[in-house]
Image (spheres, rainbow, N blue to C red):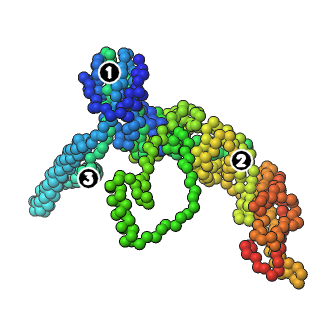
Amino acid sequence: MKSGIGVVSLFLVLTLPFPALAADHTVKASSRITSVTVYLDRAQVTRHTNVQLKAGGNLVTLEGLPQTMVEKSVRVEGEGPGTAKLEGISVKKVFLERVQEQRIHALEDEITRLTAQVQAIDARKKGLAAQEAFLQSIKVGWGERISKELGAGKPSAAELGEASRFVGEGVGKVQEQLFQAEASKKPLLEKIEALRRELEQTKGEGMKEANSVQVAIDADREMTFSMDLSYLVMGTQWEPNYDLRLAADGKEAEITYRAQVWQNTGEDWPGVKLALSTANPEVGGAPPELAPWNVSFYEPPRIVAYEEDLRRSEAVQRYQAETGRVALGAAPPMPALAPMAKAAPMAAQVQEGQTSVLFAIARPVDVPTDGSHAGTVIAVNRVPVAAEYVTVPKLMPKTYLKSEVVNNTAYPLLPGEANIFNDTVFTGKTNLKNIAPGEKFDLFLGADDQIKVKRDVTKVKKKGGLLGSSSVSYHIAVELQNYKKRPVTVSVLDQLPIAGNAEIKVNLEEPSMKPAETKSDGTLIWKLDLTPGEKKKLTYDIVIEYPKDRELTGLQ
């Protein structure tokens, strides 16, 4: 049956002073990580183990748990064929000196073993060098002997050939063996050097600290007990990133929601069932409380001579010591601060919750504890878009594809970097803000060179006459041409200057086409429809009038 008091026992253990756990039977259990839920700034790790319990009190110990474990977050649940009660949990700090010493001894033994192999190779090389010297001496000796005996008709041609082959083949084999010996020695030396560096680093490290958890379980019979241990760890994080791909027809976009997970918790997560939560436990589960906002008149501090201030201070101290009361004018005692309530972690909801969303990753994921990023796909969704082209020729003679996208998913798009694709073409990167479900956002998909834009400006400055005012006119001509094989709508943006004085008048005059929108900040927006291959020209004047005896600033 499932143990029903695990959470209650845990609460008692972690909030009340309690003696060391004791039991009739002690068990050291090995456990493995089965699942991890990663929040934005921490993670909940769940370990599983099966332990053999005896009837009566049992003390189950799980060692080697990470130092980053939050002690007050430890929970234990379990089940077995009989009745079992979780009576208490104890978390202890353990120094891993013995493990470190074992690693040092293992490194030293391995270095010794490899060094012996190198020494054996060196000894073999010395023997081969002696053989080569012997063969070379035969070669020299035979040369002298042959020169003497050739005159007497000795040795024969066959004998001479046999001797030559013997010396040549012998020297060749010895040199080949010397080369092989040297080649086999090189990787051994490299490995020895790497082990020596690790040995030096290991010796230089202090004793590593880890956590050990002891669980007291009372069982009514001998049984195999299935137990899950969960705890929070710091030093981990996940970060979203996206691939945003506009379809070829421009009517929808595919959003691939990805995640990068990394951790430095001190323990690897090999092949774990991973879940990613949008909950942020750091924020807490309740809104902050407003403190009283006091407003009063400012009173300058009273300046007192040093001697008078010293005498006053001594008199105040004597008065307080004699009466136990606070003298008038002395600083009152600091009020006791109310105890700060720790922000309770928000419980992750399965799939869509009231305040968060949980993404359960489909496949097991390996996340090592070296800070390297493990990437995974969270979801792929298609969202409707309304695409249009935008150009700001005053600043850049380019036309950009813009899409208004609606987040029609059931979960928020968290802030993160997005790769932008126009069909199959990568057009750049952007950064998404926090986008709630149902919220619209603009997505720019890069410049489109098939829509050309050109802007020409002619500036005319007129000095006011005897009665007239001065003016500056900008005659602007914007030319667009559509080289695409389909019609497009282009929004052309420009701006009117904002007058900083009532005597300055700014007007848009003689536009060849009335703007579709004029914003309060002076932004002008025209919308031009272009058929395939069509060219259009937009002209307008911006006129600034001002008193003739004044000088303008901000002209372009």
Q: Which mark is residue 204?
A: 3
Name the one closer to the observer, 179 or 318: 318
Q: Quadrant of residue 102?
A: top left
Q: Which residue is mark 2?
A: 404
- Element under label 2? strand
The front one of 498 and 14 is 14
Report whether 428 appears left or right of 198. right
Q: Amino acid at mark 1?
A: Asp
Q: Report if the CB atoms under discs 1 and 2 are less than 8 Å apart.
A: no
Residue linked to disc 1 = 218
* Disc ID at residue 307: none
Rounded to the nearest angstrom, the CA distance separating label 1 from label 2 is 62 Å
Q: CA distance from mark 3 to mark 2?
A: 58 Å
Does residue 261 show up?
no
Task: Identify the amino acid type marked 3.
Answer: Gly
As displayed, is residue 470 above or below residue 392? below
Q: Secondary structure at mark 3?
A: helix
Between 127 and 313, the one lying in front of the other is: 313
Name the N-terminal-most of marks 1 and 2: 1
Which residue is rendered at x = 44% and y = 50% of the image?
Answer: 335
Element on which disc 1 rests: strand
Q: Residue sitting at 74 percent across and 58 percent down?
A: 391
At a point 77% along the width and 59% down the height, the residue shown is 520
The C terminus is located in which quarter? bottom right
Q: Nearest the camera: 230 or 477?
A: 230
Percent across and percent down for residue 362 are 52, 33
Q: How many marks?
A: 3
Residue 153, horizontal then vertical, whole percent: 12, 58
Of callouts 3 and 2, which one flags the residue occurring earlier in the amino acid sequence? 3
Q: Residues within 10 Å of mark 2 (few under 14, many from 20)?
A: some
